[in-house]
Image (tube, rainbow, N blue to C red):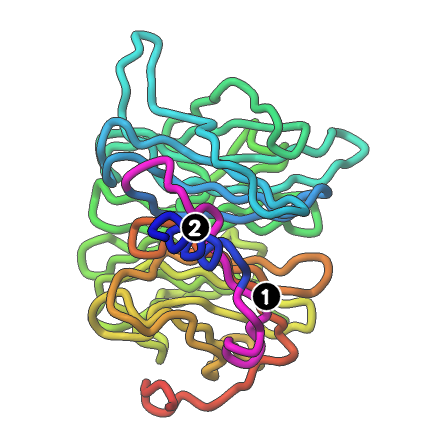
Amino acid sequence: MHRFLLAAICLAWCSVSSAADLPAGVVAEEFIYTEPPHPQCHASTIAETKDGLVAAWFGGTKEGANDVGIWFSKQTKVGWSKPVEVANGKDEEEKQLPCWNPVLFDMPATTARKGELLLFYKVGPSPSKWWGMLIRSSDQGQTWSEPEKLPEGILGPIKDKPVLLKDGTLLCPSSTEHKGWQVHIESTKDGGRTWQKTEPLCDGMTQHAIQPTILQTKSGLTILCRTRTPGKILQATSTDNGATWSKLEPMDLVNPNSGIDGVTLSDGRHLLVYNHTQKGRSPLNVAVSTDDGKTWQAAAVLETQPGEYSYPAVIQTSDGLVHITYTWKRQRVKHVTLEPAKLKLLPIVEGVWPK
């Protein structure tokens, strides 16, 4: 009887929740894995390939432990594949350092190059001392290249996905933590083989920001950033494809100094996933802007219970659905699917989430 109950509980965790039990616009939710291959996980990332969705995250004993590596899974017709470790922080002498913050991006094929799935990540003892790494896959994650260390001073996208501009430039939102928290933007025109970067957008002392997410607006680009500024998200704009940026300014949405991620939808609206709270990492919220990020409306609450629900990653796939992954209590990676047109939008007045 005990075994039967355990099996039933496991089946319940594995299955996709019924849409009738979910908020308006939320189509399904599930865990990417139910038997954790590691004690803790964090910082998931998600991408769409021609074979379907893929996801990655870092996992090991705990964040910052030397055994933390990058784990990967693919969505199949029968669920997500068993997670496999695709990168670790071992050097030539087999000394191992922790891995951090993977970011997946599927580079489309062009007349000049074949398409490939890129997996950026960081290796190092801490965020102030880490360096950028990259592996590539030409078969949607079945096999991977040998790790490449990015050039000195280049970290790749630090947490959130890059944006591919019309001219083929891959714009990577990045930041550093060794001289305070400083945001900058990196770019590559050849799939990560050569790089350029902007100067920091803040000094890291009087103003501090990290982990930007990029939105594509009617007038150019907008970044939204995590900051230590009490209860705020910072934003800046660019009208020259990310070469220069306006001053970072606080926006109305509250945030407890926790990771965020946003996406510009195919209908021109913008969607943001973040913790709408002054303290802690619950609840986890979805907001939508219809006016290029000037104002935001409440769209959905993904988690409300005590615990950590954090570090979201969000994309819109070719079928129009929105896919979100995030850290669930540092134990698992959760995947939620939204149908944007069915989200029920309500005003956020003076920073208060509507009931």
The residue furthest front is 1
Residue 264 tag number: 1
Q: Main secondary structure of the magenta part?
A: loop
- Asked if labels 1 and 2 touch by Cβ distance under 8 angstroms, the answer is no
Circle 2 residue: 7
**Which residue is at 40% across, 36% downward?**
155
**Which residue is at 62% across, 74% downward?**
340
Q: Nearer the viewer, residue 152 or 51?
A: 51
Q: Secondary structure at mark 1?
A: strand
Relative to residue 53, is residue 57 drawn left or right? Answer: left
State the CA–CA distance, disc 2 to disc 1: 40 Å
**Residue mark closest to the camera, 2 vs 1:** 2
Q: Secondary structure at mark 2?
A: helix
In x, y percent, where is residue 79?
59, 47
Magenta-colored stretch includes residue 21: yes
Query: Is residue 238 depicted above or below 78 in this figure?
Result: below
Q: Nearer the viewer, residue 322 or 187?
A: 322
- Magenta-tinted stretch: 17-39
Magenta-colored stretch includes residue 3: no
**Which residue is at 30% across, 32% downward?**
68
The amino acid beneath tag 2 is Ala
Q: Does residue 249 appear anywhere in the picture?
A: no
In x, y percent, where is residue 84?
47, 31
Structural crowding at the residue carrying mark 1, measured as other residues with C-alpha within 10 Å and reported as few (<14), some (14–19) or many (≥20): some
In x, y percent, where is residue 326?
41, 56
Query: Is residue 21 depicted above or below 159 in this figure?
Result: below
